[in-house]
Image (cartoon, rainbow, N blue to C red):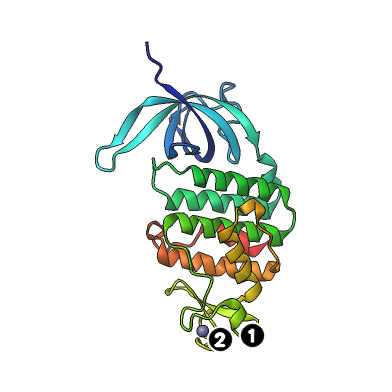
């Protein structure tokens, strides 16, 4: 008999109770992208332990004989046979900013990336960002990591903002005067203060644009961030508007978890 199970490293993005003892989970897997799976008899089950908690890297056994849920959308539900915890990031939940930043990553992946599209680079990005969120205590760094995640996600989605030059005069950051630029949501980039007027635009410091540039060029774990907490918060607000405007699946509905991250209780 040939085996129908496959092993995959994954993170749980969302878990929903289903019937009395089952759960439906949305997983970000290393090699199969984002998938929906059903874990039968997993409620209070020792077989699954804490594997289906949020912010947990688990190795799962998937049944490749998936159930087709919808003919129209070709949506499939994969059977989840067993799971073993590889790494828990549960302590993230003890800190409000960390929890908000990690939840925002889950929300963005749930809302923006298509199902069943292999995206190993997104899996790596998510996993690296989660490690960094856990390791860093300062709010400035947590906001900077959130911004780096969004910039790389927009890169993957093909809607990355242009950060290197003024959209109008094409001068680089070092060639323009002043210490800030103006984010232009609809145009997908920034303009210098000589080219745009200040009203209704997002004011972004040159330092935070430089951080954004670094985050696009380098792996997230090798990026150094120099702009302040306030400057990264302004960038986060700009990036949220950028995504709502340019990413189709978001339907202009704000990123819920950002409301918490922005408030910084
Ligand atoms: Zn300009």
In-image side of 226 versus 252 (left or right): right
Which quarter of the figure has residue 68?
top left
Residue 265 visible, this orientation: no
* Residue 225, numbered circle: none
Q: Is residue 44 above or below residue 88?
A: above
In-image side of 173 versus 27 (left or right): right
Q: Is residue 193 above or below residue 103?
A: below
Respond yes or no on whether mark 2 lies under 8 Å from ligand 1: yes
Q: Which residue is mark 2?
A: 193
Q: Nearer the viewer, residue 60 or 2?
A: 2
What residue is at 66 percent from the left and 53 percent from the top? Answer: 222
* Residue 178, numbered circle: 1
**Which SS class for mark 1?**
loop
- Disc 2: CA contacts within 10 A as few (<14), some (14-19) or many (>=20): some
Quadrant assignment for the C terminus: bottom right
Q: Is residue 25 above or below residue 216?
A: above
Q: Nearer the viewer, residue 26 or 171?
A: 171
* Mark 1 / mark 2, whichever is N-terminal: 1
Which quarter of the figure has residue 175?
bottom right
Q: Nearer the viewer, residue 191 or 257?
A: 191
What residue is at 60 percent from the left and 26 percent from the top? Answer: 49
In-image side of 7 versus 138 (left or right): left
Q: Estimate the x, y position of residue 260 in percent, counting from the top left.
A: 61, 59
Which quarter of the figure has residue 67?
top left
What residue is at 54 percent from the left and 89 percent from the top? Answer: 194
Quadrant assignment for the N terminus: top left
Image marks 1 and 2: residues in contact by CB distance under 8 Å: yes
**Which SS class for mark 2?**
loop
């Amino acid at each position: 008999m040939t085996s129908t199970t496959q092993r995959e490293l994954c993170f749980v993005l969302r878990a929903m109770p289903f019937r009395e003892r089952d759960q439906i989970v949305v997983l970000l897997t290393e090699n199969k992208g984002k998938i929906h799976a059903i874990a039968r008899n997993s409620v209070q089950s020792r077989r699954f332990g804490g594997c289906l908690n949020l912010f947990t890297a688990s190795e799962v056994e998937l049944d490749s004989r998936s159930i087709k849920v919808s003919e129209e959308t070709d949506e499939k539900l994969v059977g989840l046979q067993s799971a073993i915890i590889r790494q828990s990031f549960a302590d993230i939940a003890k800190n409000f900013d960390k929890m908000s930043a990690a939840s925002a990553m889950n929300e963005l992946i749930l809302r923006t990336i298509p199902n069943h599209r292999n995206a190993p680079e997104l899996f790596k990005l998510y996993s690296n960002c989660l490690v960094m969120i856990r390791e860093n205590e300062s709010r400035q760094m947590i906001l900077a990591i959130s911004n780096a995640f969004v910039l790389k996600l927009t890169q993957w989605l093909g809607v990355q903002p242009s950060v290197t030059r003024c959209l109008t005069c094409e001068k680089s950051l070092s060639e323009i005067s002043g210490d800030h630029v103006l984010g232009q949501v609809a145009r997908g980039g920034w303009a210098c203060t000589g080219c745009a007027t200040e009203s209704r635009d997002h004011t972004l410091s040159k330092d935070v644009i430089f951080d954004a540039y670094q985050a696009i060029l380098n792996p997230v774990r090798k990026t150094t961030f120099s702009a302040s907490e306030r400057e990264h918060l302004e960038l986060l607000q700009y990036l949220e508007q950028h995504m709502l405007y340019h990413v189709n699946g978001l339907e202009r509905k704000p990123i819920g978890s950002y409301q918490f991250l922005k408030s910084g209780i």
